[in-house]
Structures are given as C-alpha cells and as structure tokens.
Image: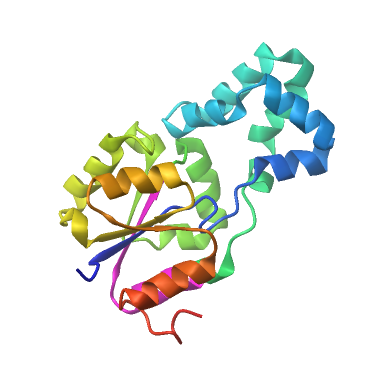
Amino acid sequence: MKPEAVIFDIGNVLIEWQPERYYDAKVGEERRRAMFAAVDLHGMNDQVDRGADFRDTIYATAEEYPEFRDEIRMWHDDWLELAKPAIPQSVRLLRQLRAQGIKVLALTNFGIGTWAIATPVYEFLNEFDHAYVSGHMGVIKPEARIYEMVEDDCGLDPAALLFTDDRIDNINAALARGWQVHHFDGPQGWADCLVAKGLLTPEQAT
C-alpha cells in the first residue's frame, strides 16, 4: 500500500539529540561518564516527556545528586545546546513531502516545556499537519497506547502510515500495530525509502 501519511520522529531524525556529546564538551568525558553512571538522566528526561514540569523535574533531580547539581541543571538551563543542530536533508524531505500534498505528521517523545522552547527556534516543527507530542498526550513511545492514539486521531488505516524513528524499540512497536516503518540511520536512507515508496522522485529527495 502506498502510504497516505508520513510520520516523523524528531530527535535524531530532524534535530540531533546527543546529551552525552554536549556534556563531553562542557565537563569532559570522564566527568560525564561518572554522572551518567550515577544518575538516570534519560529516565529523568522520560518524566519530562510524559508531561512532568520541565524545570521542576530537572531541578529536583539535581538536588538528589548534589555532587552533580550544576551539571544536571544544565539539562534545563542550556537545553537548546543539547538539542542541536537540525538535520538539513531531513528538513528538506519534510518540506518536499508537504509540497507534494502528502500528509506529514510528527510523533515525538518531547516535553511540554521543551516543545515550547524548540518550536520558536526550529520553524519546521510548526509545519506538520499535526504534531503528536508525548508530553501533551501523557504517554511515550514505545508504549502501544501512543500509537493507538495517533491512529484514532488521524483516522487512517495503520497500514497507510509510514513512520521513521531512530530507535528500534519505537519502530518495532509501530510495526506490531501494522504500520509501515523505516529505521532511521541517516537522512539519505530515509530519502531512499521515500523514493522507493513512490512519495518523492530522486530529484525531490536530495
């Protein structure tokens, strides 16, 4: 079936998300490794992505680990430096799909507060036909409920949805519901997929 809607993840698909790289540059790899071993920072971020208050969650975690208090607070205070840069070819693909009249959606683990920070800076985040943002939905990928909520809202057959994500657990959860999927490992592979699905020409997918 030719897809009727294309669904983008955002982190590491449209915007690079590499907190470890940020901290290596800020505090050094050794200090970063010690902090990530002691503190479940990605679990902390999952709370934000489920809808918890961005600042309160980060700052509360920082108080639990006073030896890393300043570094943990950077996750909030310097968040735009963690979530950068945009991935230009992926952004072009998003815009080319929309230019062809193809419905383009986002399905992303993103907090309410972080989404409010990101959308004024990354204008393409405002260009989806609809963005399904976990913080507003109260559930995160790869839980089945978030995919079900997308299906119910968009009204399309699961087999008509083409979804890309960099995390294989998120891809497998979508595949289990009958979605078409592409495991994102770079924008060129995603471009090739869109061409193979008949959604873009090779020229449009550059």
Colour mapping: rainbow
| Magenta-drawn stretch contains 10 | no
**Location of the N terminus (image quadrant):** bottom left
Picture residue at 20% right of the left edge, 58% below the top: 159
Residue 122 lies, in percent from the top left, at 54, 58
Q: Say which quarter of the image contains residue 57.
A: top right
Residue 64 point in image, percent of width and height: 66, 12
| Quadrant of the rendered image containing residue 19 | top right
Please determine whether, in this image, residue 160 is positioned above or below residue 192: above
Above or below, comparing residue 149 to residue 41 in the picture: below
Q: In which quarter of the image is residue 103?
A: bottom left
The answer to whether any part of residue 22 appears in the image is: yes
Residue 154 placement, left or right of 136: left
Viewer-nearest residue: 79 or 67: 67
Q: Position of residue 194 (x, y in %)?
A: 38, 72
Q: In this view, does 149 lie to the left or right of 12?
A: left
Q: Position of residue 39 (x, y in %)?
A: 65, 21
Span colored in magenta: 92-108
Q: In the figure, 196 relative to 58: above or below?
A: below
